[in-house]
């Protein structure tokens, strides 16, 4: 029996004996849109909750387009050319169009990496492209606070643009329910105090701050309140299949167009499974998501609903860039010193989170229910000691040992990692 996992820019293939039953959990088959600009231009002409893009752009002095950073496989090379061409034809000079990379608190994307992110040499060479810097206080407009007391600071370049546009990938998100839409604005181009207030333990430990849940999710509700405070934002949201082909494009008012894309994606990314498993094999989603251990945590959280109590999640992630930020490394070291209870008690005392410690908090969620093992070729011995989980060097051997330990020869395999969220649904 053979299966493959997304790993870096290629796949890992594992062979198991026929005595092992493999339940492969993948997205439901998704229809895809035809190649070319036609489907994208059609979404601009047939928007959700607003006028067509060509009419919205007419008479505007300038435009700011938010794009996700390098951690998201958004097909910018396909989206940006017809988007920018539509703006120029409507009368906005190309020099008055800014592409702003919504980095949140991630590092900036520069050089060849930025060219790769844009996906079009013509756009890369002709349109101004800049990164968001969340730690620069003066670069943000103060909108006061949300009803929950979260301070609102948003990148001035976006706020002051005459036409504000967002592009985003709609996929399950382990805190905000689904990514895309409002999330590209906050935390995408939010001030650090906004982001740090989003990620406190009292928000992330809320039972609704989980994958695929938006109703009653405090993070989602804060994001919606923020985009409404800013006013007039339009979004191009896309959904992709397991081969990263476009399945849906929605353009329109940011809130309503995003919800339509979420409704579409739910039908494919949320997969019903009729049993729980003692052994789950998954990935961190392959390149570009699995470049760091920080992003790898998402793949550990996604299959929680089908993990038997005391079971094992084995995750494969290249981690070609190592652990992630220095702040995340510090949080991991603190976790390794204090243990689960001590680390969570420390977080519970904070009214504002420290940068990137929330990812360690999310790592703790699956550890409360079972064990996690990591296969990677990108981390040093020192980094492996900071992961807080058990490293393995042979995936086949780790699977066979888990099967023996669990006393269950059927395993769950999730090749696409966090892009698929299995839901336990009893057969009865």
Image: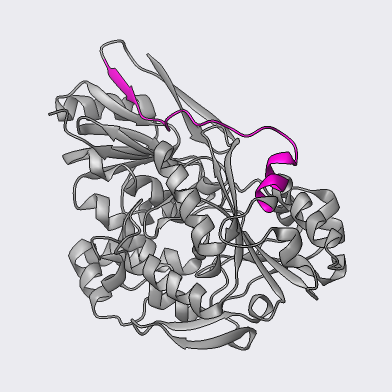
Decide if residue 222 is on the left or right side of residue 337: right
| In-image side of 132 versus 60 (left or right) | left
Task: Measuring from the top left, give residue 254's x and y in whole percent.
Answer: 55, 63
Residue 33 magenta-highlighted: yes
User: Vertically, is 229 above or below 265?
Assistant: below
Q: Specify the quadrant of the image occupied by residue 196.
A: bottom left
Work out whether residue 355 can be spotted.
Answer: no
**The N terminus - image quarter:** top left
Q: Can residue 126 be seen here?
A: yes
Direction from residue 197 to residue 380 in the image, left or right: right
- On the image, the x and y values in percent for residue 30 come to 50, 31
Quadrant location of residue 104? Answer: bottom right
Give the camera-side residue of 257 and 129: 257
User: Where residue 47 sits in the image (x, y, percent)?
Assistant: 62, 54
Q: Nearer the viewer, residue 126 or 285?
A: 126
Q: Residue at x 48, y 82 (%)?
A: 152
- Colour scheme employed for the rendering of this structure: one colour
User: What residue appears at the point 51 percent right and 87 percent down from the top-left corner?
Assistant: 143
Q: Residue 312 appears at what percent x and percent y? A: 24, 38
Q: Is residue 180 magenta?
A: no
Looking at the rendering, which quadrant does residue 396 occupy? top left
Magenta stretch in the rendered image: 20-44
């Amino acid at each position: 029996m053979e299966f493959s996992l997304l790993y870096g820019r290629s796949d890992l293939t594992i062979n198991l004996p026929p005595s092992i039953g493999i339940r492969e959990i993948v997205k439901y088959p998704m229809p895809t849109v035809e190649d070319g600009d036609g489907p994208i231009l059609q979404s601009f002409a047939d928007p959700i909750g607003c006028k067509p893009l060509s009419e919205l752009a007419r008479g505007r002095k300038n435009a700011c387009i938010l794009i996700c950073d390098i951690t998201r496989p958004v097909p910018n090379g396909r989206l940006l050319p017809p988007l920018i061409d539509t703006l120029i034809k409507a009368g906005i000079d190309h020099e008055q169009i800014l592409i702003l990379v919504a980095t949140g608190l991630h590092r900036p994307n520069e050089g060849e990496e930025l060219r790769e992110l844009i996906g079009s040499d013509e756009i890369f060479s002709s349109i101004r492209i800049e990164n968001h810097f969340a730690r620069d206080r003066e670069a943000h407009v103060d909108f006061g606070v949300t009803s929950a007391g979260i301070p609102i600071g948003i990148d001035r370049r976006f706020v002051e643009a005459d036409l504000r546009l967002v592009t985003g990938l709609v996929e399950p998100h382990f805190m905000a329910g689904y990514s895309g839409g409002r999330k590209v604005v906050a935390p995408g181009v939010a001030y650090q105090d906004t982001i740090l207030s989003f990620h406190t333990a009292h928000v992330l430990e809320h039972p609704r701050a989980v994958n695929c849940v938006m109703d009653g999710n405090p993070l989602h509700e804060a994001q919606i309140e923020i985009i409404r405070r800013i006013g007039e934002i339009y979004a191009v949201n896309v959904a992709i299949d397991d081969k990263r082909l476009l399945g849906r494009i929605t353009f329109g008012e940011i809130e309503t167009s995003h919800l339509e894309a979420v409704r579409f994606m739910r039908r494919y990314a949320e997969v019903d499974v009729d049993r729980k498993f003692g052994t789950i094999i998954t990935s961190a989603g392959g390149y570009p998501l699995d470049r760091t251990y920080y992003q790898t945590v998402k793949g550990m959280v996604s299959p929680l609903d089908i993990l038997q109590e005391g079971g094992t999640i084995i995750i494969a992630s290249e981690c070609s860039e190592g652990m992630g930020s220095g702040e995340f490394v510090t949080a991991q070291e603190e976790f390794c010193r204090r243990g689960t209870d001590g680390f969570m008690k420390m977080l519970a005392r904070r009214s504002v989170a420290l940068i990137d410690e929330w990812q360690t908090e999310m790592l703790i969620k699956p550890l409360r229910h079972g064990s996690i093992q990591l296969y990677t070729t990108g981390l040093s011995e020192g980094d492996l000691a900071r992961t807080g989980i058990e490293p393995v060097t042979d995936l086949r051997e780790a699977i066979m040992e888990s099967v023996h330990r669990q006393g269950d020869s059927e395993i769950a395999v999730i090749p696409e990692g966090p892009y698929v969220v299995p839901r336990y649904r009893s057969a009865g």
